[in-house]
Image (spheres, rainbow, N blue to C red):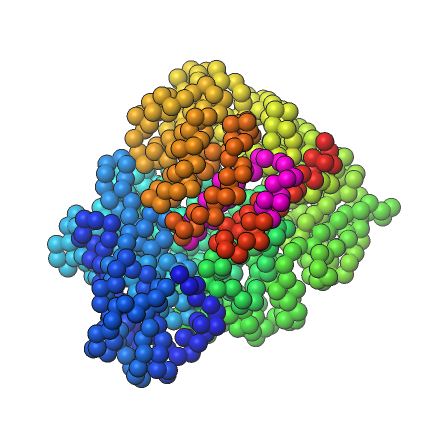
Amino acid sequence: MRALTVDEARRRAADLVVRSYQVDFDLTGTGDTFVTTSRIRFGATSDSTWVDVKPDRLLAVELNGVALEVGLLEEGRFPLTGLQAENEVVVTAEQRYSVDGEGLVRSVDAADGRVYTYGMSSLESAPRYFPCFDQPDLKAPYTVTVKCPEDWVVLGNGAATRTGPGEWALAETKPLASYFVTIVAGPYHLIRSEYDGIPLGLACRRSLAEHLDRDAEDLFRTTGQAFDEYHRMFRQRYPFGEYWQVFVPDFNLGAMENPGCVTFADHLVFRSRVTDAERSTRARIVVHEMAHMWFGDLVTMKWWNDMWLNESFAEYMAHRVTEDATDYRDNWTDFAFVRRWWGMQTDQSSSTHPVAPDSLKDARQSLDDFDGISYAKGAAVLKQLAKYLGDDVYLKGVNAHLEAHEYGNADLHEFIGKLTEAGARDLDDWSEQWLRTSGLDTITAERTPGGIVLRRTSPDGSRRPHKLSVRGYDADGSSATVDVMLAGDTVEVALSNEVVVPDADDDTWAKIRLDRTSLANLPAVLPAIADGTTRAVVWNSIRDATAHAELDPRTALELFVTAIRHERSDIAVGSLVRWLEDRVLGGYLPYDEARGPVADALGNKLATVEPGSSLQLATVRGLVATTDDAGLLQAWLDGSRVPEGLRIDADLRWSLVLRLVRLNVFGAAEIDAELARDTSTEGLVHATRCRSALPGGKEAAWTRIMTDPTVGVQELLAAAEGFWHPGQSAITAPYVDRFFTDIPRTAEIRSGMVVALTAVRIAPQYVIEPELLTRAEALVADESVAPSIRRQTANFADNLRKAVAVRRAFG
């Protein structure tokens, strides 16, 4: 189907004013479809337009009382001609439930057979379950009714009222863009509360009820704390009535900011023990979606090139507000270790783009820009902007922007204008340098007789100003700090400590390169650096220098082995182990050579960590993923030799089973036995990952990934995650070439974000062969392949090219 272009959207926005929607859903059927009727009232200044609808079967269209021929539908667009100044179009369609996470998703809980549905409207998905004018700048109030089984409950953007057996009405909303309209319908478990006059609610599958009940107090407390802070910062209170947070199955993202009814992936309802870092991450997701109530929902971008005004702002606020106003700490450390690292890799890939690009991409291509730049880099830029302007000017401009465009739309130019009115200066040049260019500068430290010289180099001739702190450290724990404005190419800093760290507080967006003396002293000094964010800055420098063949990966591995024994942050342990698994073990270094030292270091650390601590759990997970001690893993499964304080719960058991499968100790029978023990939907997903890891399970997994349109999102991604492993290179070798021939066809059976997510996970990332670059480049150049697959294949080629260069440089 055709994707909406920016020119088409602008023309339609100029031609139409949408007055209201009345959308009626009938979910009482027993098959794979349901019926939707949209009654849309709109004004028009032209005589023709179209309405977006992607039905299984179009049943009826009526414009201003006149029935139209349903056969006029073409590529998801139904033409409307002979328009009057005021119009009403009524479209009735039989729509198909979705399994790919977009449209109206239908999921069956493996635990009890209950059926759950929820609507996901983001980017081209809304017309898959209700007819609409699907673009962000045609906002209107919505009134919704739902018919469903009598034992279901219904939630949505407006407050829901049961009007009869199996019949529900949702209150009229404020003006909404189509991409965050939702309904949630099914036998959901509900928990209600209230805070500061705002009705609050939580919901999940009934099989997760006990786990949500256990965490409800924490979730409500975090929500209330964030509302207090947002109300303090913004001059307008939360504007959308009730505030439901619904944890839904088979979600393809972390969450979606539907006003009044935010949806979350239900793996965020923790059924097993998790680390403090994971709880903090959940809190930030909650606070991120709350930020969208103002940036994104109250004021919406005009076109997708300004999605950064939604996502970057929410990402920045999530870390800032969670750190300042909630019970969770170390949020900026997490940002540095996890989110920034994601963004830095994206910004150095062939798919890089400006934070605020020109309006060139259509809606489908824009989907791929929900990436490490729109989130992490944009948040870092906003953090730098707030530091650059000062909070008073920054928040004054933000509030003026919200007030000027409430319930409407705005773009970058209008946002910058309000900041300028608030007292900011020279922001046109600042935004051109930071928001309209791609790539990141490198800030290199060099020793001089008087201290340190910082040198800025840019990949594109940009002159981005960097306001940052430089901190020197010695092994005895002493430190000194100098604040620096790096506006030119160099600046001198009077620090001569054993280790000097530019941008020690992670305030700007740049690659950091330590001087040779600092690198040599890191093993002794890094444990003395108390600040977790500064340690993240150091590790990001090490990881990036390794990726670009500037630092021997064995040196990086030795630093990990030395430093991990002293590392106090579960964030750091989890992030560094993931990096080693994703890039170093079997990538930059041969798997068998590098795995052992990592496992030994984590095993040694496990003997020293506090029993029952979050750090213990993070260390155990890393050890399970890297050890070859099958006897130890089996003993833990059996409940013996378990470290004091460690609980071998359902999710940790599955991690043990997966590792034993990869060690060729467990087979299908052991997976089946574990699934019999854990019959939940989560257990089914874990079992799928384990079966994909079986030497004899590869073909079945591959066929399912590449050809089965009925598999749900979480099972699909689990099958892809379990498939490749550097310890199984001989077994998976026949599938390397098949990736390039088979992956393009997945876009024919799936749509939206899951297409790219699948391509990322099923690419042969551990096959470090230069010859693959030719295959990858040919696929990227093939314009018949879906853009999201070409883009992810280009990113795969980028990583492969780096790994090849590292191996060539260091053997």
Left or right, 446 with reference to 186 = right
Q: Nearer the viewer, residue 274 or 716?
A: 716
Q: Residue at x 44, y 72 (%)?
A: 8
Measured from the top left, where is residue 762 in percent x and y? 49, 40
Where 569 falls versus 182 (above or below)? above
Q: Quadrant of residue 270?
A: top left
Measured from the top left, where is residue 297 in percent x and y? 40, 64
Measured from the top left, where is residue 19 in percent x and y? 31, 75
Q: Residue at x 46, y 18 (%)?
A: 665
Q: Main secondary structure of the magenta part?
A: helix
Q: Which residues are magenta?
A: 752-777
Where 538 falls versus 422 (above or below)? above
**Is residue 153 in view from this perspective?**
yes
Per the image, is 589 magenta?
A: no
**Is residue 539 in view from this perspective?**
no
Q: Farthest residue toward the right?
A: 449
Measured from the top left, where is residue 402 in percent x and y? 46, 69
